[in-house]
Image (tube, coloured by chain):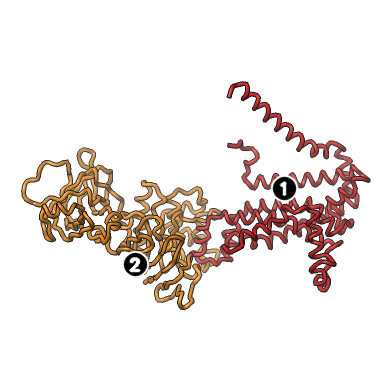
Chain colours: A red, B orange
Amino acid sequence: MSALSRLWFSLAVTIALAVALTFLILPILAIFLDTGPAALIDSLGEETARDALLLSLETTAIALAIIIVVGTPAAYFLASRRFRGRALLTTLIELPLVLPPAAAGIALLAALGPNGIFGAELDALGITLPLETAGVVVALVFVASPFYLRQAQASFAAVDPTIVDASRTLGASEAHTFARILVPTALPGLATGGALALGRALGEFGATLMFAGALQGVTQTVPLAIFDRFARDFDAALALSAVLVAISAAILLATKLLDGPDSLTRAAR
Amino acid sequence: MLRAEIETTLGELELELELAVEAGECLALAGPSGAGKSSVLRAIAGLLRPARGRISCNGETWLDTGGRINFAPERRRCGYLFQEYALFPHLSAWENVAYPLKEVPRRERRAKAVALLGRFGLAERADAAPRSLSGGERQRVALARALARRPGVLLLDEPLSALDARTRAAATREVAQVLRDLDVPAILVTHDFTEAAQLGDRVGIIDAGRIVQEGSASELASTPGSAFVADFSGAVVLEGQAHSGAGGLTIVALDGGGEVASSDIGAGRVGVSVHPWEITIETVTGEHPPSSALNRLPGVVTTITTIGNRVRLGINAGQPLVAEVTAASVEGLELAVGSPVVASWKAAATRLVAL
């Protein structure tokens, strides 16, 4: 390659990167720059905003707890057992990752709604999900759990199998080995999976809206509140968005730090 | 007493063998990689379930596929030293050693673990993380951990192969000491016949899932049952005391009498290793011609074993020695059991190994 064409190529990739960065970062900056910080904080004092924030935190926390408690052993099963149809099962579990949120909402209604497949059974048990906070949790678990399951399965599979064998020969049962050896050694990966699921749950919109509705204080989480307000009160919508962006950025930063404290600063090899 | 009969298919390999090891005895299974050595240990420890088999230790049946007995690994009390040591990366050295000490009250575990580490000279490294330990230190932590639960059987998977040559000598002494002190059956697997000869009371040569020959290391080398055993049981090991000699050579005074020179550096107690095919045999007829072979040991032929066109000669030269010559040489020299011979070989073909 001649010096001139090398220069052209360098210039081209630099411009491409600049365009991509501007496009990705400008809207995020705009959330914070469009209105002053004072106005942002003011509009967060409103009751509807507070309700939405509290509801989001509550439902996300419950959903994450369910995902971790059920997902961790389930992921271990998938990572440690060899059986027919394992690959198929793994793919099925990952399906909600690519499912359009609106379709996920419809799917949940078809399964668990009043006229759904299990509607009568849930009704007999006195459980109603649509238009209830529990419905939000169900929607969050449905869309967010694959993020955790996939990452947790990979983390368990990456644990050196001989340390698992060593634990067994040292007198530990499989359950003890799981709790004392597997979970601690896979912990950075599990935490990353948890953070990804948390981020996905926090921003969940479509499935929640379709399945649980948008009742203030009951099912109206922050993303739904942003949608509800943006036509009436753009500043208020911006304020809530800013909060979500801040939390999401914090989660992203946390996962990077879990990857290694210097993963943000070190130069790529 | 450990008894095991194992029969199973692992991919291409058909494992089918039977073994018995007395308390205080070490059986060394030596063979090339892929011969099924580690699988034998895994089956005994309960990490691999053979299709058919019976395993019992000190009268307790651990596995009987016919009687549907199959103890979980945690119930078998095997002290298992893994090839790469398998230390728990998230636990410190002492926590690794304390891991199996479940019956010891929590408050006393640290003291007990540090005491065990102290036996291997590692008390000061008790709080170190495994990744900050050297290869030799890792091996000793893993040994201390494997012994912590007072195992009924000791299983050693290539205990020295992950170490560099410098550390290997000290580690060999360490493992040999553990084997001497411990009054339980021990099985060691290795791809290195010299290691098997050094550490095993008995050596079993394993090939393609079967034990093809079993006996003392010198028996295997002098009377190999097949070409495979002959090739594999290459080096014979003589024991002696080393001191430095003229011309930068090391002189070893052999235990059974006689001296040999080696171009390797060594001091104190050493093993002298030489390949049978490096050894020249002369009959004792008087003056020997000038030769570059510095090492000359007189002896008497004890066994003659023909393998194809080669012949293995077992020679009593104070210690058992093995030479490999052609059938034509045996005929030409009119060798027979009882013939007095001189075995000679070059100092440059003489390796020193740690004892």
How far is the residue under mark 2 from the one under mark 1? 58 Å
* Residue farthest toward the left in the current orientation of the protein: B286
User: Is residue A131 visible in the rendered structure shown here?
Assistant: yes
Q: Say which chain tag 1 marks.
A: A
Residue in the picture at 59% in, 66% down: A175
Q: Point out residue A51 in the picture as x, y percentages from the top left corner.
A: 87, 54
Q: What quarter of the picture does the N terminus of chain B occupy? A: bottom left
Residue B147, visible in the rendered structure = no
Crowding at dot 1, Cα within 10 Å, few <14 / some 14-19 / many 20+, comes out as some
The residue nearer to you, when weighing B10 against A122, is B10
A62 left or right of A8 in image? right
Q: Amino acid at mark 1?
A: Ile
Q: Quadrant of residue A15?
A: top right
Residue highlighted by disc 2: B24
Q: Amino acid at mark 2?
A: Gly
Please name the residue shown 67% across and 26% down the image: A11
Image position, residue B29 (x, y; %): 35, 61
Q: Which residue is mark 1?
A: A251
